[in-house]
Image (spheres, grey):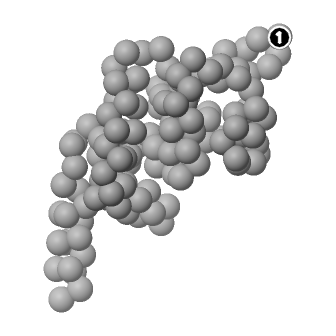
Amino acid sequence: MVANGDDFTARLMNDMDPALLDFVKSKVNSFIKWDLVRFFYENPNTADTVDNIARYAGRNATAVKPELDDLVESGVMEKREVEGTSIYSLADNEDMRELVDRFILACEDRHFRVKAVYHIIRGMR
């Protein structure tokens, strides 16, 4: 009987725009990444170091660095070296920026946020 409940929950939680569902499952698959994407959405022209980004996001730099690097690898962020220091910024790719915009705007809906949280927690298992 539990399996049917699990199936229903999975169907309900997967009832999202497919592009946003993929974005949550494959790119913004942690709460730190979610915070970072929101920060860069609100500050789209920011290009800064891990330490400063972590401070602005209210997070620990040690926890933020691997998450930023994952976001770079998945195409959400870009990283460049300036005098031996890594500088991170939101990807300049128009399609990715539009996807970030769609994600953040969708987050205004409580039902969408619940589904996104579900997928992040499920992905942490």
Q: Position of residue 19 (x, y in %)?
A: 26, 37
Image quadrant where residue 40 sits: top right
In the image, residue 58 above or below residue 4:
above
Q: Amino acid at mark 1?
A: Glu
The N terminus - image quarter? bottom left
Q: Position of residue 101 (x, y in %)?
A: 37, 30
**Visible residue check, residue 123:** no
Q: Camera-side residue: 94 or 40?
A: 40
**Residue at x 22%, y 49% (from the top left corner):** 16
Q: Position of residue 47 (x, y in %)?
A: 65, 19
Image quadrant where residue 68 sits: top right
Q: Position of residue 108 (x, y in %)?
A: 35, 47
Q: Camera-side residue: 38 or 92?
A: 38
Left/right of residue 55 with respect to residue 92 in the rendered view = right
In the image, residue 76 above or below residue 84:
below
The furthest residue to the right: 83
Left/right of residue 19 with respect to residue 96 in the rendered view = left
**Residue at x 19%, y 72% (from the top left corner):** 7
Left/right of residue 99 with respect to residue 57 in the rendered view = left
Describe the element under mark 1 as helix, strand or loop.
Answer: loop
**Residue at x 40%, y 23% (from the top left corner):** 97
**Visible residue check, residue 3:** yes
Across the whole image, how many numbered discs are drawn on residues? 1
Q: Camera-side residue: 75 or 98?
A: 98
Image quadrant where residue 5 sits: bottom left
**Residue at x 67%, y 15% (from the top left corner):** 80
Question: Which residue in the protein does label 1 denote?
Answer: 83
The furthest residue to the bottom: 1
| Mark 1 closeness class: few <14, some 14–19, many ≥20 residues within 10 Å | few
